[in-house]
Image (cartoon, helix red, strand yellow):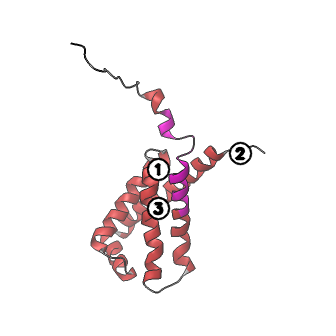
Amino acid sequence: MRRQPELALALIRVVVGLVFAWHGFHKIFDLGLGNVTASYGVAGVPLPLLFAPLVAVLELVGGPLLLLGLGARGLAGALALLTAGVALAPLVAGRLSLAELEVPLLLTAGSLAIMVGGSGSPALKDRSAEVLPPARNPGKRKG
């Protein structure tokens, strides 16, 4: 049996990117940042006025970038921290609910896999050399 780790990472990246993009879209355009901020406060998230918009924008912008494979390792690291915090919030508040933990834990694991393993292939970053001309290095001038 032949292994295809690059394809597996790409599949994880695309699905995780789609989920983050959808969550960000939902927070900003469906629920509204005011409602998200209020729910963060109820959930015990510290500094909800700061974290609600930060999380929503990171998800909305980072999800599509991750899906495309642009800046995948860095974005995946930031998103892993974000979802780990979301998973911990109910525990800190004294609630242990698998329903509240399963999606953040899956997104954290998927993000960590991308952070460690890379974006996989195919990714838009793999095509950049075909689209962009090679960088010129003029070197030191003689004189």
Farthest top residue in view? 143
**Quadrant location of the C terminus in the rendered image:** top left
The answer to whether 94 is drawn above or below residue 128 in the figure is below
What residue is disc 3 on? 80
Mark 1 Cα shell of 10 Å, populated few (<14), some (14-19), many (≥20): many
Farthest bottom residue in view? 94
Mark 3 Cα shell of 10 Å, populated few (<14), some (14-19), many (≥20): many
Three-letter code, disc 2 = Arg
What segment is highlighted magenta in the picture?
109-127
Three-letter code, disc 1 = Arg
Gap between marks 2 and 1 measured at Cα? 22 Å
Q: Quadrant of residue 56?
A: bottom left
Q: Is residue 101 left or right of residue 6?
A: left
Gap between marks 1 and 3 measured at Cα? 10 Å
What residue is disc 1 on? 73
Q: Give the residue drawn at x 36%, y 82%.
A: 42
From the top left corner, tell me how far across and down residue 7 is, in percent: 63, 45
Mark 2 Cα shell of 10 Å, populated few (<14), some (14-19), many (≥20): few
Dot 2: element: loop
Three-letter code, disc 3 = Ala
Q: Give the residue drawn at x 33%, y 74%.
A: 35
Gap between marks 2 and 3 measured at Cα? 26 Å
The answer to whether 70 is drawn above or below residue 21 in the figure is above
Q: Compare marks 1 and 3 and give the one earlier in the sequence.
A: 1
Q: Compare marks 2 and 3 and give the one earlier in the sequence.
A: 2
What residue is disc 2 on? 3
